[in-house]
Amino acid sequence: MPWIARLAIIALAGTMALLVLPAAPADAAPRVTAEQRISATVSLISVYSPSMHRTIRAHVLHPAGRPSGLPTFYMLPGAGGAEDGISWYDNTPVRRFFADKRTNVVLPIGGRFSMMTDWISDDPILGRNKWQTFVNRELPAAVNRAFRTNGVSALSGVSMSAGPALDLATQAPGKYRAVAAYSGCPGAADPLGTIAATAIVARGGGNVLNMWGPPGGPAWRAHDPVLNAAKLRGTAVYLSAGSGLPGPVDGDPLRTGGGLVGGNIMEAIALRCTTNMADRLSALGIPHTFVHRPDGVHTWGLFYADLRNSWPMIARAIGA
């Protein structure tokens, strides 16, 4: 074959190689990549997140035998993302509480100081945060497949994640049959909500500008559940907060956490924020439950009491 013909063939092959798009990587879809059976009713799963390019762990509480066709209740962690050993799983008897319930309960481990949202930029300290994508899309896709659920779900948040749980529900109207916010600060664009969110991110060493841009900007308003409360119409909503005064609901603060170091201030702020959310829902004529306790200083004793109190409403909504 003449050298010019061979050169033409080589050139054509190179051009075709450039035109052929690479195949999607095998790990492009969210999925459970590993599972550890801790007991007959508890599993620890690892879920690959394409949006964050990493694996996120989660405890899953489920009935013995892992029956198919059950609903799912997602319970988001507090400020430390449960990575610090402070969580529903570590600090409350949720395993015992849900042992006889006909539902899967998913407790993600991750999202520390992230406000459980999609950040517009990666952060030098907190890294890549795409928690709205993970919680609303990737995690349910993986859980529904691995646990053969019926696709019906509810969502809750506590402390840092309480307001974000409401935000996540407004970002995907109708996705969750019920949403609960325990002792958090719903609101983002108002002064108190902005201060609270900024303080949480800063506590983790993050830059809040990497989250939603300058405070008061359009992204802050878009993620404010008070401003977007109308999108919760048709969703069962539970809101709760303590008074900021210690009391029996807290139990032993040394065991249940909080209360002794700023818990009274945090809960007083949570009460004000949560009251604003309840008032907004009332103004819109959206049914909801708001529990304002006479005691409670941001402890797991308080949070667990409100979980138990909210469960009948959540169970009815998801058919558990």
Image (cartoon, rainbow, N blue to C red):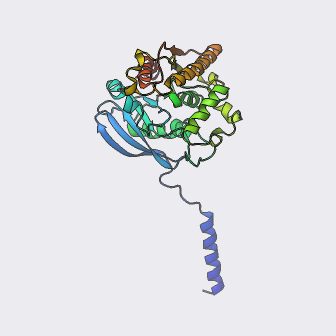
Residue 81 placement, left or right of 199 = left
Residue 312 placement, left or right of 244 = left
Q: Residue at x 52, y 40 (%)?
A: 134
Q: Is residue 307 above or below residue 48?
A: above
Report the number of numbered marks. 0
The C terminus, quarter of image: top left
Q: Find residue 224 and report its horizontal and vertical position in percent.
A: 64, 28
Q: Is residue 8 above or below residue 213?
A: below
Quadrant of res 105: top left
165 and 286: which one is in front?
A: 165
Q: Find residue 99 and report its horizontal and vertical position in percent.
A: 32, 26
Q: Residue at x 48, y 52 (%)?
A: 27
Q: Find residue 50 and report its horizontal and vertical position in percent.
A: 52, 48
The N terminus, quarter of image: bottom right
Residue 65 placement, left or right of 265 = left
Q: Residue at x 53, y 35 (%)?
A: 136
Q: Find residue 235 and report its horizontal and vertical position in percent.
A: 54, 21
Q: Is residue 291 visible?
A: yes
Q: Is residue 69 visible?
A: no
307 and 255: which one is in front?
A: 255
Q: Residue at x 58, y 38 (%)?
A: 202
**Residue farthest along the bottom direction in this orientation:** 2
**Residue farthest along the front direction in this orientation:** 260
